[in-house]
Amino acid sequence: MTYKQYSNLKDIDQALIEYTAKLKETSNTIT
């Protein structure tokens, strides 16, 4: 795996973390 691919994976991972955090926030406000 090249370094570029690795950094892309890290970016995707970070985006997923932020996305799930947003989902949790919205679900908390709904309930």
Image (spheres, grey):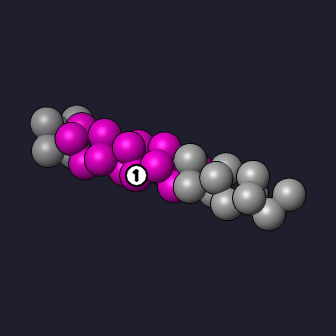
- On whether residue 17 falls in the magenta region, the answer is yes
Give the residue displayed 67% in from the left and 50% down from the top.
24
Residue 4 horizontal/vertical position (percent):
14, 44
What residue is disc 1 on? 15
Q: Is mark 1 on a helix, strand or loop?
A: helix
Left or right, 3 with respect to 6, comes to: left
Give the residue displayed 21% in from the left and 41% down from the top.
7
Instruction: Tell me, yes or no, if residue 9 can be seen here.
Output: no
Outermost residue on the front side: it is 29
Nearest to the observer: residue 31 or residue 17 = 31
CA neighbours of label 1 inside 10 A, class few (<14), some (14 to 19), many (20+): few
Give the residue displayed 64% in from the left and 52% down from the top.
25
- On whether residue 5 falls in the magenta region, the answer is no
Outermost residue on the left side: it is 3
Quarter of the image containing the C terminus? bottom right
Left or right, 21 with respect to 24, comes to: left
Left or right, 31 with respect to 5, comes to: right
Quarter of the image containing the N terminus? top left
Q: Disc 1 residue type?
A: Ala
Left or right, 25 with respect to 1, comes to: right
Q: In which quarter of the image is residue 22?
A: bottom right
Magenta stretch: helix, strand or loop mostly? helix
Q: In which quarter of the image is residue 13?
A: top left
Residue 9 horizontal/vertical position (percent):
32, 44
- In the rendered image of this protein, does residue 29 appear above or below residue 21? below
Residue 27 horizontal/vertical position (percent):
75, 57
Nearest to the observer: residue 11 or residue 18 = 18
Give the residue displayed 74% in from the left and 59% down from the top.
29
Q: Give the range drawn in magenta.
A: 6-20
- In the rendered image of this protein, does residue 16 appear above or below residue 7? below
Residue 30 horizontal/vertical position (percent):
80, 63
